[in-house]
Image (cartoon, grey):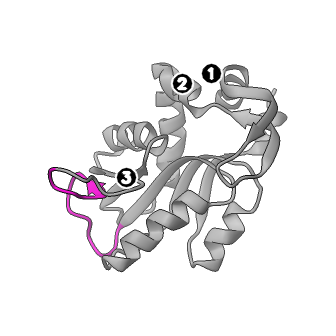
């Protein structure tokens, strides 16, 4: 299976879309489409396994799109997965991070599509305020619209399975 071609076929939409950052784009990747197909999601996670740094202790999937990717990646690597909410629950445990306790180091953030990196940076601020220092950020698609650079300014490396141009030009 050519993963990039399948992502483009299943999840690439053309039109006018507003991104989380507020920017407009004529291309949108509906991540829920590529995450909804088990064979494709597994192939994506298999492709991401080599991106996981040695000494990773927890894969932290960001709500909502990073969670399926982190879960399958966890299954393949046998590294525990945690789930990072945008906001702490207002009931029960009132946590923003679900799953195993997060160590101070050895945490890898997992996201689906990165544009400006805003959602990741929001999560990183919460994690750092709790003493957690993420190793790197992994994503399926880097839209190449400033996210990698924004993360670098915060001392984080972005490792992507694909860049937007890889999806666009896949054959």
Among all residues in the image, which is located at the extreme front? Answer: 90
Find out whether the residues at labels 3 and 1 contact each other: C-beta distance under 8 Å: no
User: What residue is shown with label 2?
Assistant: 40
User: What residue is shown with label 1?
Assistant: 1
Find out whether the residues at labels 1 and 2 contact each other: C-beta distance under 8 Å: yes
Q: Is residue 12 magenta?
A: no
Task: Look at the numbered disc 3 and give the secondary structure of its residue.
Answer: loop
Q: In the image, 150: left or right of 41?
A: right
Residue plotted at (70% across, 46% down)? 19
User: What residue is shown with label 3?
Assistant: 85
**Is residue 135 something one can see in this rendering?**
no
Q: In the image, 1: left or right of 59?
A: right
Residue plotted at (66% across, 28% down)? 7
Structural crowding at the residue carrying mark 2, measured as other residues with C-alpha within 10 Å and reported as few (<14), some (14–19) or many (≥20): many
Report how far apart the C-alphas of labels 1 and 2 lie in the structure: 8 Å
| Viewer-side label of 2, 3 | 3
Could you tell me what secondary structure mostly forms the magenta stretch? loop
* Residue range of the region highlighted in magenta in the rendering: 92-106
Mark positioned earlier in the residue sequence (3 or 1): 1
């Amino acid at each position: 299976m050519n993963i990039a071609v399948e992502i483009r076929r299943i999840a690439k939409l053309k039109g006018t879309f507003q991104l989380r950052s507020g920017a407009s784009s004529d291309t949108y990747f509906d991540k829920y489409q590529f995450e909804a197909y088990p064979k494709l999601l597994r192939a994506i996670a298999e492709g991401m396994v080599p991106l996981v740094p040695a000494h990773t202790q927890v894969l932290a999937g960001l709500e909502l799109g990073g969670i399926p990717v982190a879960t399958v990646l966890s299954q393949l690597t046998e590294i525990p997965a945690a789930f990072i909410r945008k906001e702490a629950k207002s009931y029960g445990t009132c946590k923003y991070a679900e799953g195993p306790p997060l160590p101070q180091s050895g945490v890898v953030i997992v996201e689906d599509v990165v544009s400006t990196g805003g959602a990741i940076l929001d999560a990183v601020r919460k994690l750092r305020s709790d003493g957690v220092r993420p190793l790197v950020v992994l994503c399926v698609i880097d839209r190449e619209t400033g996210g990698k650079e924004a993360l670098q300014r915060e001392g984080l490396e972005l490792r992507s399975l694909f860049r937007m141009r890889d999806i666009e030009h896949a054959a």
